[in-house]
Image (spheres, rainbow, N blue to C red):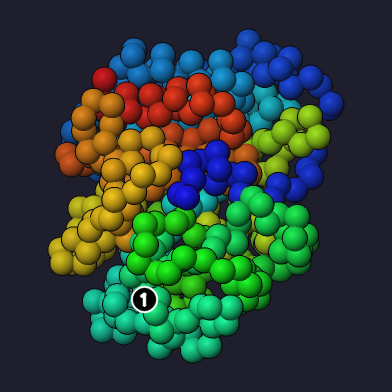
Amino acid sequence: MLPDIRVLAASIAPLAGNSVSGVNPRLLFGLAMAAALLTTTVACGRSDEPAPVLSVEFTQAVDRLLQQHIPGVQVVVTADGKDAFHSVGAGNVATGTPIPDDARIRIASNTKSFVATVVLQLVAEGRVGLDVPVERYLPGVVAGNGYDGNRITVRNLLQHTGGLPNYLDPDKMANSIGNRHRQPFDTEQVVRETLREKAPLPGAQPVYSNTGYLLAGLVVERVTGRSIGTEISKRIIEPLGLSSTYYPEPGESTLRAPHIHGYDMIDGKLTDVTELDDYGIGGADSALVSTGADLNRFFIALLGGRLLAPQLLAEMKSTVPADLPLPGLRGVGLGLFRYESSCGTEFWGHGGGAPGFGTLGGVTPDGRAVTLTVNFMPSSEQAMTAISAARDTALCGR
């Protein structure tokens, strides 16, 4: 099952961090709301076009998210090369400081869109084939326990149709993988341990699998001889000038400043989980760090044809049906999801969740991009509905 951002966050083992003084979380949230610093700013881009207008309906929809006990929310709207920012609540609960416009966040599964783009660029170069079995690039890696790399293609990896189990499945967090979170992330070892579990045959309805993207990252590394982080930087981050985006170095557990602090409930206490070790942040499935503005620029460039030729962008946007619990989801492409907003507008993007961080957003056909970030993963359906409503209001220009 392809999870929504609550499940995505729950699927990554949270680490014990610094509790916020043992204060009752609801009281702490109440204080954050009472002292909430609400900011709306506009950053000029290279265009002479006016900045995106943030309506009263939109700002009210965002403000209401604090009622869902989320410490802080940031929405970045990008159109015609200019950004508009709207933030409420606290970026750091301990100090009460607001969220800076250029705050870095863990973008989690949005990383998959970057990885899929790199793979498709290698397809354009004739170095990778979408419908070529994984075994050609990773001999012997997908094998045993009924798995056969000759029956799973690169396309299957990118579209979650490889029948691969999810190494971050919450049900597995008590086993040896979940308990190794103090050790460096070893992609091949994680894959080997995960493939002990049997799974459906490839080509079935999408079953969300972070494992497939670990393998896609390995394909890139075997073909290029360089790390997936290096390839993402060389092919996407540097050409687009995404100066606040980076792939963490091995063992890099902290976020580079400026950044939002992320929170989770651990043993009944609101806990700062901003700092994660190498295991917790994953690899090619979820490791990237970015900002709302950089993420918008990436998706605008991708969907605008700056990173892929038309034929390959069409491949990326070729979807399979998915009856999966992501608000507005209409189809699963290659590292890209097709959504429909509550106003009927189609948009493309991904989304992601990690301990303490969740992002929703996308790009409309006219190039309006939105990234909404929260620094606490809500568990209620009411909260998810409110988050989706705020996203849709921004995308619809209401």
Q: In the image, what residue occupies the spot 55% across and 43% down?
A: 7
Displayed quadrant of residue 116: bottom left
Q: Name the residue nearer the viewer: 329 or 240.
A: 329
> Going 71% across and 64% down the picture, which residue do you hit?
177
* Element type at mark 1: loop
- In the displayed structure, would residue 121 be above or below residue 53? below
Between 205 and 329, the one nearer to me in the picture: 205
Left or right of 113 on screen, residue 30: right
Q: Nearer the viewer, residue 135 or 371?
A: 135
* Vertical order, 159 against 154 (above or below): above
Q: Name the residue under label 1.
A: 153
- Packing grade of label 1 (10 A; few <14, some 14-19, many >=20) is many
Q: Residue furthest top?
A: 34
Please state which of residues 147 and 331 is positioned toward the viewer in this rendering: 147
Locate residue 273: give its quadrant.
top right
The answer to whether residue 32 is left or right of residue 40 is right
